[in-house]
Amino acid sequence: MIFKVAILQMRSENRACEENINNIIKYMTEAKENNADILLLPECFITGYDLTIDNDAAISESDLAVLCDKAKELGIGLVATALTKGSVKPQNSAFVIGKNGEILMKYSKVHTCDFADERALESGTEFKVCDFDGVKIGIMICYDREYPKSARILMLKGAEIILVPNDCVSMRPRLQALSTRAYENMCGVAMANPNGKNAGNSCAYSPICWDGNDECVDNTLLLADAETEGLFYAGFDMDAIRKYREREMMGNTFRKISAYSKLLDEKIEYPFVREGQ
């Protein structure tokens, strides 16, 4: 079974929700025509990545009705992204919408960039996995992917494919990190980033880094350029990935968990002390 992800590389307009939703519907239709199973959007695509928005102006699940209806009509999934209503402040969220139009999962960004403008947001509190048409999907949003533990927890919760809505620049080290997240967790990874100078580079990586003869193979499925706007596609061979996960030694195999207790220590010492932690 090939799980085909359509990845949108495009920048949306701030506070132009109707226009942005119309663009999503356009690309959902195109992605379906190209036999994609799901469309992955960049970060905060519906609302735009406008961090001056207040909680009342952020969206809620009910605002996704037209996209849910279109997903059901077309028979395609969607990772819809937006600034959403939190308990006090907005959250940076992604909704996984199934092919039947049902919202399968809402995930809110755990690693908000509290050293910058995202300190105005309310962080999510857990990483989540859902079943999408027989494929276990996890979500990381932008800065989440800078922390190896984000992907590791998703793997431990059963994720087979990790989808990454993103909006940032200077992508080279981040691409290397995403390839590593795929390798070390034996999970497929796909990332959507807005196009632009020093941006773009939407990508997808297979977890398969050795073939059946133990020869190294390139696990890059997709690497877009920086400035092209539009859809890119990546196909994950789920049968091959599942066989690979059954035999190889990464993921949740041979881990020495008793040596990991320091990971849960909240103490922060020099040189990592920062204002606002």
Image (spheres, rainbow, N blue to C red):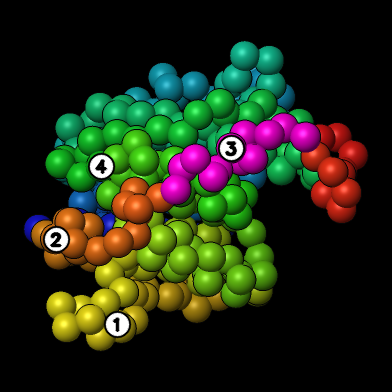
Classify 206 as above or below 78: below
Instruction: Please report whichever mark, 1 or 2, sits nearer to the chain's N-terminal start.
Output: 1
Q: CA distance from mark 1 to mark 2?
A: 16 Å
- Judged by depth in the image, the label closer to the viewer, 3 or 2, is 3
Residue contact between numbered discs 2 and 4, judged by CB atoms under 8 Å: no
Is residue 69 visible from the viewing direction of this image? no
Residue 217 badge: 1
SS assignment at label 4: strand
Measuring from the top left, give residue 232's x and y in whole percent: 35, 68
Classify 127 as above or below 209: above
SS assignment at label 1: loop
Query: Around disc 1, counting alpha carbons within 10 Å, would you say few (fewer than 14), some (14 to 19), or many (20 or more)?
Result: few
Measuring from the top left, give residue 88's x and y in whole percent: 68, 15
Q: Nearest the camera: 252 or 58?
A: 252
SS assignment at label 2: helix
On the image, numbered disc 3 is attached to which residue?
Answer: 261
SS assignment at label 3: helix
Residue at x 67% of width, y 70% of height: 170
- Judged by depth in the image, the label closer to the viewer, 2 or 4, is 2
Q: CA distance from mark 3 to mark 2?
A: 32 Å
Measuring from the top left, give residue 215's x and y in whole percent: 25, 85
Q: CA distance from mark 2 to mark 4?
A: 15 Å
On the image, numbered disc 2 is attached to which residue?
Answer: 243
Span of residues in magenta: 256-267
